[in-house]
C-alpha cells in the first residue's frame, strides 16, 4: 500500500472520511494534505499517543541516531527521557522567534544523558542548516536517522528544508500550526547513504492549542520574532491575555514572551470573574525565573507572588530562566 507524501497515511479510495483518502488510484497526496497545502484548509484529526509510543519503541530497538527537535517555545522533553535510549542529536528550533538568546546556555538547558551533540536552528530563517547537516552526517550510525519531537515542534518543516537545500527533490511534507499534521512515519531518502524518517510527534498534555479553536491557534502560535513586553508593578495588578489567562502580580517586573498577535491588557482592579477562569496556580519567586504556560509562551520575573488564572487546564510550570 502506498503512503501519502504529505502526512504518511496509507492511501485508500474507499472511505472519504478516513485518513489517506484519494479519489484516483494514482494520486500521491491525500485529500486532506492537498487541501492544507493548496487552500490552507484544515480538518483536525485526533490521534492518541499509543501509536506514537509504538513508533518510539521500534526506534528504541535500533541503535540509530535520533534527531530530537525541540521548539524553543516548548522545551519539555520529559517524555523522551523516559522512552528514548538511542543517541540523540538535540535540535532546538524556531531560533527566529526570540532575540537576545544566549545560544550556548540555552542549548545546554536540556539535560538528557544520551545527547551526543546540540545545535540551534531556524527553518524559517535558514539558520545553521549546514551545521545541522554536518552533525547528522557525523553522528549517524548507518543510513537511518529518525526525527522525533512533540507535535508542532517543527520536524516536518526542518526535513522539507533539508530536502530543498541538499537534494534535487522538492519539499513535499505537509506542515501546519495545527497539531497532528503528520499522521504516520514518512520515509525521506536524502541520498543513497541517508534516509530520514519523519514521525507524527507526541501530543503533549496540557498544551493550550488543544483547547482552542482553529482560528485562535493562528494567533497563539507565534510566526515572527516576539517582542517581549515588560511591566513594572509596584502594587497589585492584573494582566489579561485575551480571555485565556488572568495573571495577578503583587510586585516587581514582569515580562511577557507571547505572540504579539494576542491582546494583553493591564488592569489595576480585579474583575471578579472566577467562573471564567476555573483553574489557578500561584508561584512565589525569589530569583530570576520563567513561568511557562504550555503552548502560549512564558513570563519572566524576579520576585514576588504571581497567580495565574486560566480558562483551560493548561499545564503551567516554573523553570530556571532561559536568559542569563
Ligand atoms: N517561526 C518559526 N516557525 C516554524 C519554524 N519551523 C516550523 N515552524 C512552524 O511551526 C509549525 C509546526 O511545524 P511542523 O513542521 O508542521 O511541525 P511538526 O508537527 O513537528 O512536523 C508550523 O506552523 C511551522 O510553520 C521555524 O524555524 N520558525
Ligand atoms: Mg509533522
Image (cartoon, helix red, strand yellow):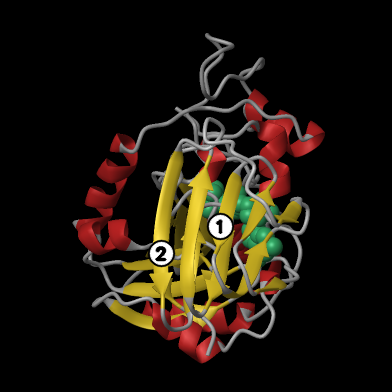
Q: Are marks 2 and 1 in contact (CB under 8 Å)?
A: no
Q: Residue 167 sits in which quadrant?
A: bottom right
Find residue 311 and report its horizontal and vertical position in percent.
53, 37
Quick check: 324 left or right of 65?
A: right
Q: Secondary structure at mark 2?
A: strand
Numbered mark located on residue 208 in the image: none
Badge 2 residue CB within 8 Å of ligand 1: no
Quick check: 211 left or right of 63?
A: right
Find residue 103 and report its horizontal and vertical position in percent.
55, 87
Find residue 13 and report its horizontal and vertical position in percent.
56, 13
Find residue 217 and report its horizontal and vertical position in percent.
66, 41
Q: Residue at x 26, y 64 (%)?
A: 81
Earlier in the chain: of badge 2 and badge 1, it is: 1
- Report the front residue among 260 and 81: 260
Residue 83 visible, this orientation: yes
Q: Is residue 42 above or below residue 247?
A: above
Badge 1 residue CB within 8 Å of ligand 1: no
Q: Residue at x 67, y 50 (%)?
A: 240
The crowding category of the residue bearing disc 1, from other C-alpha atoms within 10 Å (few below 14, some 14 to 19, many at least 20), is many
Q: Residue 301 sits in which quadrant?
A: bottom right
- Report the front residue among 295 and 274: 274
The N terminus lies in which quarter of the figure? top left
Amino acid at each position: 500500500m502506498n503512503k501519502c507524501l504529505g502526512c504518511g497515511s496509507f492511501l485508500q479510495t474507499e472511505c472519504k472520511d478516513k485518513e489517506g483518502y484519494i479519489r484516483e488510484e494514482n494520486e500521491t497526496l491525500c485529500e486532506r494534505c492537498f487541501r492544507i497545502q493548496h487552500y490552507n484548509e484544515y480538518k483536525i484529526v485526533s490521534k492518541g499517543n499509543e501509536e506514537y509510543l509504538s513508533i518510539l519503541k521500534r526506534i528504541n530497538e535500533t541503535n540509530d541516531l535520533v534527531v530530537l527537535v525541540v521548539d524553543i517555545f516548548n522545551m519539555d522533553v520529559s517524555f523522551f527521557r523516559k522512552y528514548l535510549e538511542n543517541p540523540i542529536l538535540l535540535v532546538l528550533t524556531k531560533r527566529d522567534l526570540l532575540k537576545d538568546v544566549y545560544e550556548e546556555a540555552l542549548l545546554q538547558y536540556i539535560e538528557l544523558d544520551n545527547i551526543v551533540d546540540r545545535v540551534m536552528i531556524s527553518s524559517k530563517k535558514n539558520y545553521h542548516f549546514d551545521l545541522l547537516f554536518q552533525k547528522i552526517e557525523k553522528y549517524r550510525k548507518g543510513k537511518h536517522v529518525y526525527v522525533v519531537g512533540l507535535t508542532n515542534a517543527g520536524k516536518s518543516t526542518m526535513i522539507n528544508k533539508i530536502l530543498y537545500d541538499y537534494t534535487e527533490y522538492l519539499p513535499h511534507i505537509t506542515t501546519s500550526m495545527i497539531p497532528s499534521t503528520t499522521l504516520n512515519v514518512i520515509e525521506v531518502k536524502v541520498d543513497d547513504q541517508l534516509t530520514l524518517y519523519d514521525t507524527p510527534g507526541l501530543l503533549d498534555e496540557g498544551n493550550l492549542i488543544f483547547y482552542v479553536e482553529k482560528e485562535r491557534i493562528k494567533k497563539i502560535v507565534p510566526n515572527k520574532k516576539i517582542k517581549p513586553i515588560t511591566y513594572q508593578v509596584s502594587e497589585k495588578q492584573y494582566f489579561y491575555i485575551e480571555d485565556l489567562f488572568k495573571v495577578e502580580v503583587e510586585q516587581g517586573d514582569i515580562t511577557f514572551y507571547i505572540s504579539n498577535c494576542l491582546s494583553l491588557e493591564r488592569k489595576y482592579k480585579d474583575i471578579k470573574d472566577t467562573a471564567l477562569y476555573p483553574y489557578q496556580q500561584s508561584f512565589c519567586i525569589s530569583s530570576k525565573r520563567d513561568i511557562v504556560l504550555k503552548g502560549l509562551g512564558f513570563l519572566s520575573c524576579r520576585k514576588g507572588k504571581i497567580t495565574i488564572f486560566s480558562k483551560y487546564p493548561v499545564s503551567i510550570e516554573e523553570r530556571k530562566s532561559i536568559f542569563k
